[in-house]
Image: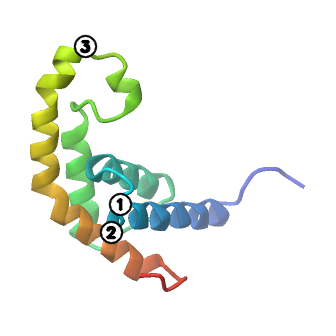
Amino acid sequence: MSNHKSIDQEHEEAIQAIVLLARDILAGRYQILKGACELYYLCQYGRVSLDEPFDTNLRFIESDCQGLPLFDDFRAKCSSEYLERQEPNIRQFEEAVKNEVIETCNVILRKFDTAGNT
């Protein structure tokens, strides 16, 4: 028997991870911008499609985050002066997209949360 996961199993695991992340974002346990980027990657990896405009919104948010030092590996390479200059940009962008991300998380839970914990 192979140790490789089936495509269906990978898809189901991706959906579970997406639901958990959406719950964490809504509960304030995960930062909005980082969460949106992670949701985008999980949807791409797991071949999970959201209804429009949510797929497009996540794609645009993730794209706009590419130059921001959000993740620890990127932040570790940045000077403290650069990080200090970028923090207002991060906060401003997060505030601008917060409602879209929250709405996307609610859509995810309505669509995929079979546990009914929405």
Q: Which residue is mark 2?
A: 105
Q: Nearer the viewer, mark 2 or mark 3?
A: 3
Query: Type of residue at label 1?
Result: Ile
- Binning the other alpha carbons within 10 Å of mark 1 as few (below 14), some (14 to 19) or many (20 upward) gives many
Q: Position of residue 58 (x, y in %)?
A: 26, 56
Q: Is residue 107 left or right of residue 112?
A: left
Q: Tell me the number on the disc at residue 25.
A: 1
Q: Position of residue 113 (x, y in %)?
A: 48, 78
- Binning the other alpha carbons within 10 Å of mark 3 as few (below 14), some (14 to 19) or many (20 upward) gives few
Closest to the observer, 33 or 9 = 33
Query: Type of residue at label 2?
Result: Cys
Residue drawn at x 18%, y 59% is: 98
Closest to the observer, 95 or 38 = 95
Q: Is residue 111 left or right of residue 91?
A: right
Mark 3 → mark 1, Cα distance in angstroms? 28 Å
Q: Which residue is mark 3?
A: 79
Q: Position of residue 112 (x, y in %)?
A: 46, 77
| Mark positioned earlier in the residue sequence (2 or 1) | 1
Kind of element beneath mark 3: loop
- From this view, report whether residue 19 is shown above or below residue 112: above
- Binning the other alpha carbons within 10 Å of mark 2 as few (below 14), some (14 to 19) or many (20 upward) gives many
Query: Type of residue at label 3?
Result: Ser
Q: Is residue 61 left or right of residue 95?
A: right
Q: Cβ–Cβ below 8 Å for labels 2 and 1?
A: yes
Residue drawn at x 23%, y 42% is: 63
